[in-house]
Image (cartoon, coloured by chain):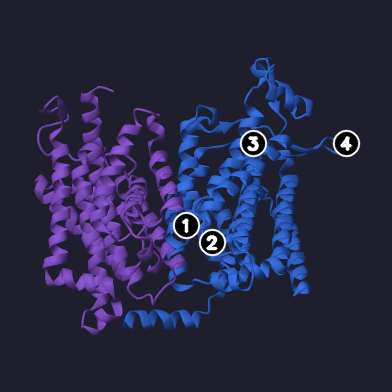
Amino acid sequence: MKQRKNRALAALCLLVVCIHLVTVLTGSQYYLTQLTMAAYYGLVIIGLGTLMGYAGQISIGHAGFFAIGGYLSAALTTRNLASFQGDWPVRWLDALKMLKTTQDLSGDQLLTVAPWAACLCAVAAAALIALIIGIPVLKLKGHYLAMATLGFGTIIYRILLASPYFGEADGISEVPGFTLLPALGGLGPIMISGDADLRVLNYYLAWGVLIAGMVLLLNLIGARVGRALRSLHSSEDAAEACGIDTARFKLRVFVLSAVYAAIGGVLLTHFNGGIGPSEASVMKSVRYVALVAVGGMTHLWGTLLMGVGLTFLSLRGVFGTFDDAVFGMILILVMLFAPEGILSLRLKLVVQRIVQGVRS
Amino acid sequence: MSLDLFFQYLFAGITYGSIYAIVAIGFNIIYNATGIINFAQGEFVMLGGMISISLLQFMPLPYAIAGAVAITMAIGALIEILFIRWLDSPSVLRMIIITIGISILLRESALHIWGESIRSLPYFYGNEITTFSLGSVHLSPQVLWVITACAVMVCGLSVFFKGTPLGREMRACAANRTAAILCGINTRNMVTLSFMLSAGIGALAGCVMSPITYTQYDSGTSLAIKGFTVAILGGLGNSMAAVTAGILLGILEAFSVSVVPLAFQDAISITILLIILFIKPHGLFGSSEAARLKDF
């Protein structure tokens, strides 16, 4: 089991390098930009996949957590705090060396929160909100759970759309890059940004983060927690009878998946240099659910491959104006014919099922 | 708040509330027959409005509305036959995802057919500025149309379910499916019928509300969330309680405008939904014992 997992991970790393080499050889390096974005969305999808597949809880509100991460980080790193310099929260942040002073275009002083601090704040806020929301929401089941998470996502969307602080319908733009390591000697700075010079670096950074996230989840699933989660998925009552604290496990996975979504949101926002309210829309949440469903709910590798693959195609604009319609159609077809995911399909069985369906 | 303003808000609340009630009843009809929450319910309302607006170019208003209701009912039946009829006891999670997929498909088709523009039917009587006075309150005649149409629908459904053989068969199917099959009722047809019925009343509600609230390709989603809030508030499956709950939510929402900005209006009803789900998930009028026996 362990060997297989390591082999699969090694294959994925090899694939990432191979794709880079292929784009270099064919001179199509612009593909790397969308692959980088797809990797960040992949982070959201594998997190949600763990929640849906292993803990058996649906969430139609994960775009909300993605947006909380992205928007908070964007707002903290762009909104000028100079006029609040004397107030206690700003002084407190300053004492912790979490502030950054730059000049804006007209030469005025621009006092913002440093990206690393903003990232921490954003992810922590998403985790906290997930915890507070999760305690009551996860007591619900089925339709009620779906509607409650849908409602949560819609509230976040409405708040973002109505608050001037978050840029209303325009969103937030001109978000600075996220410097992980400053420039050292001959090496340039290691930072997450959409700069064309840093494209290759960002590609590897994004996939590095995604693979690290994947390793973490795979280890989680393989461990005692994972076994507890799987028992939860098949029968909550039975799991409870075996002495598993189902409520606590569900809540932990919910928070974990929210953190994954928030990290994806933060990094993608710094990479794109901006975020808009459409990232928080219900359609995005539904899309994440669709991608998890396509990959197979209890199949994290399938979720990763199908999720990143389809997101990449969508970002390339392959589906044109039918983008949302394609995802809706995928959702229906997968749930009708292959509820275990596309990769589990056995063609013969499907044909049989369709024939039976037509007969009845 | 002056008394006039109070009544003005009250009537606005009742108008919107009766529409929410109709959407909620649509949820309940399908839920009773199948145990499914049809996430595409709001799209039926949108379709009703859109189709009637298109038909109006070719025929007078009453025929356009009748045509829109008939076409939406056919779409409802088609959806059931294509996507739901042949599934053998699917899991709840699967059904949720399928109906969400259907709602996306309907919405996207509407976007490609009618575009993003906001449309509306003309006022049934007079125009935007026609009002009549009820004491000191000024109302648009369309408000009466909405309230009357909703009241007629509720009474009609009540008579249909209690008085006609077909309605009784549907209720039998809702109460106990196996027993209904043993009595010779074709339960699959009853499920198709329930989809047609809820599509039909949704479409009619979509027509009468269109002059006031306008119709856009994506106006179904927020209606569906509010309709679901009302269905839960009244207790899932209980259509008569949904009427009370709908008007209650409508009034709450109308008065909330005087306290918080309009942009947050949707957030208010969703917050109410979340609070009810957390505190009293079996609804204001439902009993917790009955709720425990149901399969969510």
Q: Position of residue A226 (x, y in %)?
A: 67, 67
The amino acid beneath tag 3 is: Ser
Q: Residues within 10 Å of mark 4 (few under 14, many from 20)?
A: few
Q: Is residue B20 visible?
A: no
Q: Is residue A93 left or right of residue A187?
A: left
Q: Colour of chain B?
A: purple
Q: Separation of disc 3 and disc 1 at Cα?
A: 28 Å
Q: What residue did someone put label 2 on?
A: A57
Q: Separation of disc 1 and disc 4 at Cα?
A: 50 Å
Q: What residue did someone put label 4 on?
A: A184
Dot 1: chain letter: A
The amino acid beneath tag 1 is: Leu
Q: Separation of disc 2 and disc 1 at Cα?
A: 8 Å
Dot 4: chain letter: A
Image vertical order of residue B265 relative to residue A57, above or below: above
Q: Quick one: B115 or A66, which is closer to the camera?
A: A66
Query: Which chain is assigned blue?
Result: A
Is the residue under label 1 in contact with that under label 2 (CB below 8 Å)?
yes
Point out which mark residue A145 bears: 1
Dot 2: chain letter: A
Q: Separation of disc 3 and disc 2 at Cα?
A: 28 Å
Q: Residues within 10 Å of mark 2 (few under 14, many from 20)?
A: many
Which secondary structure, mark 2?
Answer: loop
Pointer 1 or 4: first along the chain = 1
Pointer 2 or 1: first along the chain = 2
